[in-house]
Image (spheres, rainbow, N blue to C red):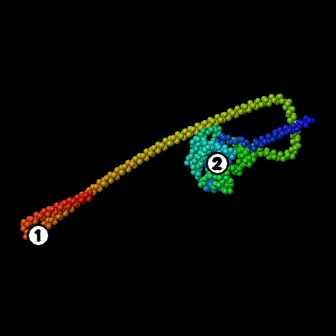
Amino acid sequence: MKITTIIHPTIRLFVIPLFISFLILPLQQAQAQESGYLENSEKYSREELAQMLAPIALYPDALLSQVLMASTYPIEVIEADRWIKKNPNLRGEALDDALLDEDWDPSVKAVCHFPALLALMSEKIGETTNLGNAFLAQEAEVMDMVQELRAKAYAQGNLTTTSEQKVVVEKQTIVIEPANPRVIYLPYYDPYSIYGPWWYPAYPPYYWGPSTVSIGLGVSYWHGFSFGFSFGSWSYIDWPRRYIFIDVHKRPRFVRHDRWIVKPGRWHHAPSHRRGVVYRDRSTAMKYGQYPHRTRDFGRYTRGAPEHRDRIRDRDRSGSDRIKMDRKERGYMERGRPERERVDRNRKMREHAERDRQERAKGGRNGQDRERGDRNRQVRERTEQDRQVRQRSEQERQVRQQAAQERQVRQRSEQERQVRQRSEQERQVRQRSEQEGQVRQRSEQERQVRQQAAQERQVRQRSEQERQVRQQAAQERQVRQRSEQERQVRQQAAQERQVRQTVQREQQQRSRGKISVQEGRRERQPSERGRISRQARENDYGGRGRADQGRNMR
């Protein structure tokens, strides 16, 4: 009696809790499997973050912040892309006015100003959703990966200040800003080459750019989009704190004031704009109030496996049906629970005792069977592990070969492009040298023409000067001739006057008859001497006058 009294409480103390734990654990495991969420420890790896951030890491900070926020609302991205394609002529203020009537997140409306980028996000909605999930769950790691990718591009010399953008390096942070705040250029590039040789061959980076353009090294740009306002003034990335800051005092024109954010500070995700799209991990779903039975698994198959999604969807349906059945049965079981528990305890005790007896009887034989089964199981597990290792190594080898082939193809195309560029440059150099030679010839001809014209002008000037000298000499000769003629005329007139005077005196003397011949002779001699002296004085005065006239003419 005493032994039984001791055994029964011992059994109740150890066996019943053990049995209850056996019942509860499978139910918890089933619920965890049926929820569809990944555990919090299953985050995106660095390889996956580099893969999804490579095509957008070199965007200007303002545009990058809009893309990261908009990627958390994939349904609205698809709706906005369809709306833009139906209204392709909306630009500038007309687009802002039309966006006022749409109930989308401001980040999605901002990306509408870049139709090419919006089309890529809608077309690659799986990659966009993964990007949004990573940004919601691992925001700081996303910011760090962006800076790491920018540092690699900067080290390769592929991230520099240009006429389209301005690169500012502040300690360990690289900031990209538009060169003109009112014109933003959307870059596209080849992630395989822009960051140097890609270091995760098993996770090739995404490419967000025009599919019809073959690109190589460097950054290219879509057509610039002009804004009448500062595009990213209402949001910017706070790199030291690694989050996006919202300035509520700079509300964009395409958002109504009653739909704008009230408090400034860190950006917060709006679950209402998520439109029912499930979150990747359990903590994010619980943070934004999403129930487990509405989940889907996005992150487990990051590189794409559509067949798994249907399987997960069926599993979610069956899990939700099971939960409903459990709720109905739980109501009926609550009533007879005490009696059932007592009956179950007695039955389990009997079964446990019978099981112990059988195990003691078959202990030796079962031990050997278990050892043999364990050895076989270990051999099978080792074989399976070896097979998986070989498959993984083969896959990695194939991936490396494919990456090497693609790298060779890119190198060949790059070499051909360089050869074409060199030939084009040489042709341009030849054309420039020919044009410069022609320009020099033309300038030489013009110089010769100018020299010839100058010489002719000098000859004409000399001939004109000589003609003027000859004219002046002729004029002087004429003046001298005229003066000489006048002098001769004056001399002749003086002689005639002297002759007339002499004649008159002779006539007067003959008329008087009182003068003798001697007196007449005496008188004629002094008169003749006076006449001769007068003529000499006149000749002297005439010579002096001609000399003065000659000096004046000279």
Q: Residue 341, can we see it?
A: yes
Q: Nearer the viewer, residue 400 or 234?
A: 234
Label 2: which secondary element: strand
Nearer the observer: mark 2 or 1; the answer is 1
Q: Nearer the viewer, residue 524 or 186?
A: 524
Label 1: which secondary element: helix
Q: Residue 151 placed where, x, y %?
A: 61, 42
**Location of residue 134 by image quarter:** top right
Residue type, numbered disc 2: Asp
Horizontal side, residue 225 vs residue 308: left or right: left
Horizontal side, residue 117 vs residue 342: left or right: left
The tag on residue 508 is: 1
Residue at the farthest bottom position? 512
Residue type, numbered disc 1: Gln
Choose the circle earlier in sequence order: 2 or 1. 2
Horizontal side, residue 481 vs residue 276: left or right: left
Residue at 79% x, 29% y: name it: 371
Q: Nearer the viewer, residue 415 or 465?
A: 465
Q: Residue 85, can we see it?
A: no
Answer above or below: position of 550 versus 278.
below
Residue at 29% x, 54% y: name it: 466
Q: Residues within 10 Å of mark 2 (few under 14, many from 20)?
A: few
Horizontal side, residue 70 vs residue 486: left or right: right
**Location of residue 92 by image quarter:** bottom right
Residue at 75% x, 46% y: name it: 292
Residue at 87% x, 32% y: name it: 357
Q: Residue 518 placed where, x, y %?
A: 7, 66
Q: Residue 247 placed where, x, y %?
A: 65, 52
Q: CA distance from mark 2 to mark 1?
A: 144 Å
The tag on residue 238 is: 2
